[in-house]
């Protein structure tokens, strides 16, 4: 295999993907800017550069379709940059469509597909037209001295022309900065000057008398009068001088260097040809990152040659080199490789425990004390390193949620345009970090919720205005960390969920009985939104379709070990809250024992563990419950649920353990098969549950009777999922352990209640309970049992 | 690679056997290796090519609520493997588990590595296509679809390990193995 070129291709894909994502972000910003009416030329420039880099990459890897798209895009962007074409919504649509197409092209390229792509042809044609279409803003009249134009980059020239076309006055600002503080100084100046106008270019001037400071000449276009500018900038020590529009300087100067003559032509005083620049290439460029001004620069060269091709024009070499460098510092890793590493860490942990055990043995065997101590020390080192190794790998897996939020923002824009609604998306907490795998799996559910929010949540403009809401709808996308969890909220200020219609529909569909409906709380009704097939909007939209979504969203989120909750107020809005674990790779778990079999319960779901006082168990509407800290806690006897013997009984776990459909041996009437577990049987069973260890009529051997008092001390592990709590009754608590969850194979995918399995320190395998699914099941079970009067099983 | 192993002709395995074997092989058609195992007293076999490994009975972790034919899960070098009780899958009688019990690691569909419980592993048979009776012709249409065929190796050949020498047609030597071997189509067995 040509692994070398394979890897290079991989690299190409991930880099291209990254650039395309960045492109999407920039476009969103551009879209914002366009709406607000002030387009930042720098942004267009960023977009241009991204496309240019893509073009180069695509060319390098022979992705011809990508490079032809990039080429056409580049032309359009260049026109945008130079003001030949205005940034308008249709143009932006074209650009957004390109971003989408890039994604498809990349996918096709990756899979080696080469079939024709009609949308590409269409877009290319549109781009051809688009490039010619827009009206030019800049008057472009040759009012400016050609000599000045020669110094300015094309981009600066465009800014200059725009200012002139808008009838702004040109000013020359002169300001002196201490070299040490030039960064802050310049930022301050930029911020102060921005409201008043547009900074066209910075030109360093030299006084030649002070090696610690630098004087900058700034060319600025502004509507404001000289006096206004002066008072605004005076405190920074800026001299303001308006420039006449026509070049009235001493005429064309000798050519070399043209820059100097141009400056003369415009009263920008030519600095005395002072000591040559120490590092000319570091001299400020057109849009200068001033931090690059070398501090040892005695006197800046007035118009350093590189300036001419720097900045806004075609990305210079330096920038490309910059990219290469950044690539070299980050490594893209296939997440599966990290999984492999994580597995190895798991194995190491097992080795560690084994070592510990051996050490124990050595102590008992009175081996050489010194040897033992040394070994012990080694073992501790080993342990520490394993722990930091694990932490390190976990850290690598974490990525900011921003990755998925950016995608969402793009989708939001698209949908809101399609739906003809104006939506303002407010994102907070994009920097919150989550396991890469979770981020990947999150994008579809979140996307769907976003669509729902815009399509079903936010009202039509007229409707909003009628109820005195701002015409532009707001969707807030918030993320924050909460303990071991990450919370993501999607909140809209729309009309809220119409619970009456939801309920009506639920009744029509037979999900809820009519008499049942009357007693349902608002919260219960709202939760119906997660029932398959329920949607409140009767018309099917192209975007969110019918309510096939929310149940899928819920399923997907619970697969990630998360929960989703909904809150909604009519006329005020709807809020979906998704709570997710931070990582899937490794979790802290409580190891419990049920009938001699060990299970792991993710600690994230565990609130507390308490003794089970059998006397306190009451049956409420067919469900067993206890009162814990003032509120009712439904109980779930794991042994019964799993069809394990209720008592630690060796015969219950032979080589086959116990399929649930095989009643455990030795229990005449104690445990009903799960299939028949319904509220009726719970009630009957309660007789047994009250004296759970010796069902009446059981011919238990006396040995078990003897065991009974000890077994009475069982535990309730209180699990909390969202706002729901469930008490899992277990035989004993073994302890806490960090475990690596491994998925159960496809052959067990239909077995509900387990999130996977893990190898414990003692090499045994324990099943990891899927607490959200269990809670779900117990509550659904109870609900349904109640709704159908307990006559149906499930 | 695995299929090569299974399909390799006897000449490739025992070149020394020479002309005679080649001739025999020509007469009988291509030869496939089958691993025979015992389930509830009967002899079954599956192509060697799909069997990755034979394990002794690990301590199993039962999975509550799983179908009854799933015995539980084991860890094979860190990988979780679901173990299926072939006796239950095929609805056979269940005798006590002895120390002869083994777990065959297979991945017939290329989807998941599975463990198959068998009562005892017997031996490898080389069977030519001509020695395999296809069930539809032998037993009519009412046979379970997981039975790929029936073979009577004792009448046709000696077991593989004895087949190296001249005893090729000595029927008497292997009379005690003269039972019928039921060839399983594991894909069907495991997908049901």
Image (spheres, rainbow, N blue to C red):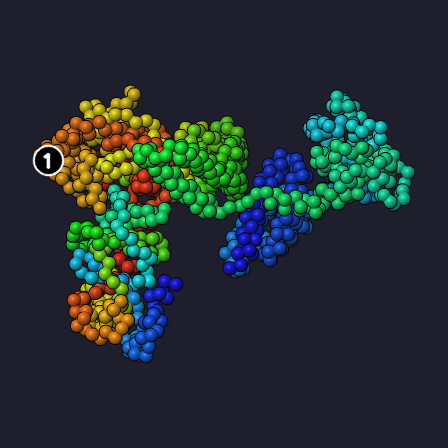
Answer left or right for A35 relative to B61.
right
Q: Residue at horizontal 28%, vertical 59%? A: B186
Extreme residue in the top direction: A630
Residue B39 in view of the camera: yes
Answer left or right for A112 relative to A240.
left
Counting labels gives 1
Residue bearing mark 1: A701
Q: Residue at horizontal 34%, vertical 53%? A: B113
The x and y percentages for residue A195 are 69, 28
Task: Give the vertical position of A533 relative to A495 (above or below).
Answer: below
Residue A501 picture quarter: top left
Q: Chain of mark 1?
A: A
Residue A444 in view of the camera: no
Residue B90 picture quarter: bottom left
Q: Nearer the viewer, residue A331 or A581?
A: A331
The x and y percentages for residue A84 are 71, 45
Answer left or right for A145 relative to A47.
right
The x and y percentages for residue A26 are 60, 40
Q: Residue at horizontal 28%, vertical 71%? A: B164
Q: Nearer the viewer, residue A562 or A60?
A: A60
């Amino acid at each position: 295999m040509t692994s070398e070129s394979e890897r290079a291709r991989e690299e190409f894909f991930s880099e291209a993907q990254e650039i395309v994502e960045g492109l999407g972000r920039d476009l969103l910003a551009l879209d914002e800017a366009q709406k607000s009416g002030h387009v930042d030329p720098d942004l267009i420039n960023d977009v241009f550069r991204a496309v240019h880099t893509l073009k180069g990459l695509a060319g390098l890897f022979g992705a011809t379709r990508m490079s032809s798209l990039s080429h056409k895009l580049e032309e359009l962007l260049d026109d945008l940059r130079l003001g030949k074409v205005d940034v308008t919504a249709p143009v932006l649509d074209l650009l957004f469509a390109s971003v989408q197409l890039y994604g498809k092209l990349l996918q096709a390229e990756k899979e080696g597909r080469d079939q024709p792509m009609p949308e590409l042809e269409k877009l290319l044609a549109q781009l051809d037209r688009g490039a010619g279409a827009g009206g030019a803003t800049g008057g472009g009249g040759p009012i400016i001295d050609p000599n000045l134009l020669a110094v300015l980059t094309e981009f600066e020239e465009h800014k200059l022309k725009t200012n002139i076309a808008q009838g702004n006055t040109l000013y020359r600002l002169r300001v002196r900065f201490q070299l040490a503080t030039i960064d802050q100084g310049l930022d301050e100046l930029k911020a102060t000057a921005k409201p008043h106008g547009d900074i066209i270019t910075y030109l360093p001037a030299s006084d030649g008398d002070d090696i610690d400071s630098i004087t900058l000449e700034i060319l600025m276009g502004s509507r404001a009068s000289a006096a206004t500018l002066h008072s605004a900038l005076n405190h920074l020590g800026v001299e303001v001088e308006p420039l006449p529009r026509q070049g009235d300087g001493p005429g064309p100067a000798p050519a070399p260097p043209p820059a100097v003559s141009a400056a003369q032509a415009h009263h920008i005083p030519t600095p005395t040809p002072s000591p040559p620049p120490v590092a000319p290439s570091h001299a400020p460029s057109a849009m200068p990152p001033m931090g690059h001004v070398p501090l040892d620069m005695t006197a800046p060269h007035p118009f350093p040659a590189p300036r001419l091709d720097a900045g806004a024009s075609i990305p210079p070499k330096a920038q490309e080199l910059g990219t290469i460098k950044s690539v070299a510092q980050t490594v893209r890793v296939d997440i599966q490789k990290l999984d492999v590493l994580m597995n190895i860490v798991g194995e190491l942990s097992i080795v560690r425990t084994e070592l510990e055990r051996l050490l124990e043995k050595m102590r008992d065997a009175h081996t050489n004390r010194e040897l033992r101590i040394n070994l012990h020390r080694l073992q501790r080192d080993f342990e520490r390193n394993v722990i930091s190794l694990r932490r390190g790998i976990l850290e690598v897996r974490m990525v900011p949620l921003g990755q998925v939020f950016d995608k969402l923002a793009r989708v939001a824009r698209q949908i809101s345009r399609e739906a003809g609604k104006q939506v303002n998306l407010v994102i907070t907490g994009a920097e919150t970090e989550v396991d890469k795998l979770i981020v990947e799996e999150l994008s579809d559910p979140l996307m769907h919720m976003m669509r729902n929010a815009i399509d079903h949540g936010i009202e039509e403009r007229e409707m909003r205005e009628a109820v005195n809401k701002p015409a532009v709808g707001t969707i807030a996308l918030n993320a924050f960390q909460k303990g071991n969890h990450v919370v993501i909220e999607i909140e809209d200020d729309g009309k809220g969920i119409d619970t009456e219609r939801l309920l009506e529909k639920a009744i029509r569909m037979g999900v809820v009985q009519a008499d049942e409906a009357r007693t349902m709380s608002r919260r219960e009704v709202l939760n119906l939104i997660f029932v398959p097939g329920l949607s409140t909007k009767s018309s099917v939209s192209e975007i969110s379709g019918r309510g096939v979504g929310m149940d899928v969203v819920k399923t997907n989120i619970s697969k990630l070990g998360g929960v989703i909750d909904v809150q909604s107020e009519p006329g005020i809005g709807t809020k979906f809250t998704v709570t997710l674990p931070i990582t899937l790779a490794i979790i802290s778990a409580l190891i419990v024992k049920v009938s001699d079999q060990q299970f792991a319960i993710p600690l994230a779901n565990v609130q507390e563990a308490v003794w089970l006082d059998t006397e306190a168990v009451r049956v409420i509407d067919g469900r067993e419950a206890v009162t814990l800290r003032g509120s009712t806690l439904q109980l779930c006897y794991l042994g019964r649920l799993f069809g394990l013997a209720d008592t630690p009984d060796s015969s219950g776990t032979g080589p086959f353990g116990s399929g649930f459909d095989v009643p455990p041996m030795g229990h005449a009437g104690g445990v009903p098969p799960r299939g028949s577990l319904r509220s009726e049987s719970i009630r009957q069973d309660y007789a047994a549950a009250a004296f759970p260890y010796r069902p009446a009529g059981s011919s238990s051997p006396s040995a078990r009777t003897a065991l009974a008092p000890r077994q009475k001390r069982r535990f309730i592990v209180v699990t909390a999922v969202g706002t729901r709590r469930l008490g899992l009754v277990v035989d004993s608590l073994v302890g806490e352990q960090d475990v690596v969850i491994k998925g159960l194979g496809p052959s067990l995918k239909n077995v509900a209640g387990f999130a996977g399995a893990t190898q414990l320190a003692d090499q045994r395998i324990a099943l990891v309970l899927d607490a959200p699914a269990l809670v779900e099941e117990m509550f659904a079970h109870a609900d349904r049992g109640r709704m159908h009067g307990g006559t149906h099983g499930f | 690679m695995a299929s090569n192993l299974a399909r390799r002709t006897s000449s490739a395995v025992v070149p020394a056997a020479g002309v005679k074997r080649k001739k025999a092989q020509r007469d009988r058609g291509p030869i496939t290796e089958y691993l025979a195992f015992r389930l509830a007293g009967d002899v079954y076999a599956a192509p060697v090519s799909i069997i990755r490994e034979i394990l002794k009975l690990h301590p199993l972790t039962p999975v509550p609520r799983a179908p009854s034919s799933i015995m539980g899960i084991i860890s094979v070098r860190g990988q979780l493997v679901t173990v299926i009780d072939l006796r239950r899958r095929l609805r056979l009688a269940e005798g006590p588990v002895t120390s002869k019990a083994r777990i065959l690691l297979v991945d017939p569909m290329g989807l998941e590595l599975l463990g198959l419980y068998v009562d005892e592993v017997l031996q490898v048979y080389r069977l030519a296509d001509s020695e395999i009776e296809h069930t539809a012709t032998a037993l009519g249409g009412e046979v379970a679809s997981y039975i790929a065929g029936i073979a009577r190796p004792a009448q046709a050949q000696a077991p593989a390990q004895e087949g190296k020498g001249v005893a090729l047609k000595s029927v008497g030597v292997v009379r005690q193995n003269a039972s019928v071997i039921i060839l399983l189509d594991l894909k069907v067995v495991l997908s049901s």
